Amino acid sequence: MGKKKVAVLISGFGGNLQALIDACAVPGFPAEIAGVISNKAEAYGLTRAKNHNIPSFVVSHKDFKTRDEFDAELHKKLTGFGAEIVCLAGFMRLLTPEFVNKWQGRMINIHPSLLPAFKGGNAVEDALAAGAKKTGCSVHYVIPEMDSGEVITQREVEISAGDNLESLSQKIHTQEHIAYPAALKIVCGKL
C-alpha cells in the first residue's frame, strides 16, 4: 500500500510542518507531503518546503472577496496536489463549513491545549490566566465548529509557577512536534 498524500496549510514559521517533514522522511512512515500552501507570502514555512523540494504555493486570503472564493481556490490547489489528507499547521484562517465538510475525516488540526479546554486563538494565555496546573496539545479532526472535532491524540505538559507565555508555548511546541506525526500516522491507518 502506498503512502498517503498529505497537503499542509500554514501561515507562519512552520515548526509543525518541519516535524511532519521529518516524520515523512523516516522509512516506513505512511505519508508523504505532496504540497504546502500558505495564506501569507512571508511565512518561513514556505522556505522549509522549498528546502525539502516540496511544491508550495501562496494563496492569499486578501486576493479574494469572500471566504467562499478563498476556500474554493484552496480546494482546487489541494486536489491539484492529489491530497488525501489535509494538515492544518498554524494555519490562521477559519474555513467555511462547506470546505470543511468536503474534507471531513481527512482534515486534522493541532491546537495548543488539552481540548475541550481552552478552545480558540488564545489557548496558552487562557490556560495561564485560569491558573491551570497542566495543559498541552491536541490533534483533532476538523469539523465546522472550531476546535470541536474528535481528538486523535494529546500530549500533556505541566504548568510551572514561573511559566510565562513564552516558556509555556515552548513546552507545548516541543510536545506538538511529537503529537502531530503520531496523529497523522493514526489517520493514515484509518483511510
Image: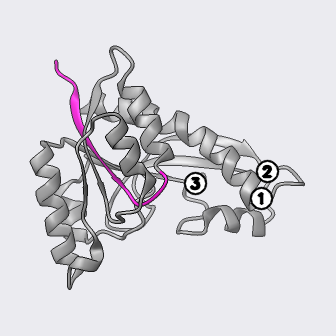
Instruction: Label 2: state its secondary structure.
Output: loop
Instruction: Label 1: state its secondary structure.
Output: loop
Pick whichever, 154 or 166, lies toward us.
166
In percent of width and height, residue 61 lies at 28, 74
Tell me if I can see residue 81 in this picture: yes
Task: Give the residue number, with chain letter if any, for mark 2.
Answer: 159
Q: Looking at the image, tell me whether mark 3 or mark 1 is earlier in sequence order.
A: 3
Q: Residues within 10 Å of mark 2 (few under 14, many from 20)?
A: some
Q: Which residue is at 35% across, 27% downward?
A: 24
Residue 99: name its quadrant.
bottom left
On the rendered image, what quadrant is the C terminus found in?
A: top left
Q: Which residues are magenta?
A: 1-13
Q: Residues within 10 Å of mark 3 (few under 14, many from 20)?
A: many
Tell me if I can see residue 155 in this picture: no
Pick whichever, 107 or 47, lies toward us.
47
Which of the numbered marks, if any, corresponds to residue 132? 1
In percent of width and height, residue 187 lies at 32, 35
- Residue 41 drawn above or below residue 108: below
Task: Kindly indicate whether the residue at mark 1 contacts the one at mark 3 (C-beta within 8 angstroms).
Answer: no
Q: Looking at the image, tell me whether mark 3 or mark 2 is earlier in sequence order.
A: 3
Q: Amino acid at mark 3?
A: Pro
Q: Amino acid at mark 1?
A: Ala
Circle 1 or circle 2, nearest the eye: 2
Q: CA distance from mark 3 to mark 2?
A: 13 Å
Residue 67: name its quadrant.
bottom left
Task: Give the residue number, with chain letter if any, for mark 3.
Answer: 112
Q: Which residue is at 85% across, 49% downward?
A: 160
Pick whichever, 155 or 175, lies toward us.
175
On the rendered image, what quadrant is the N terminus found in?
A: top left
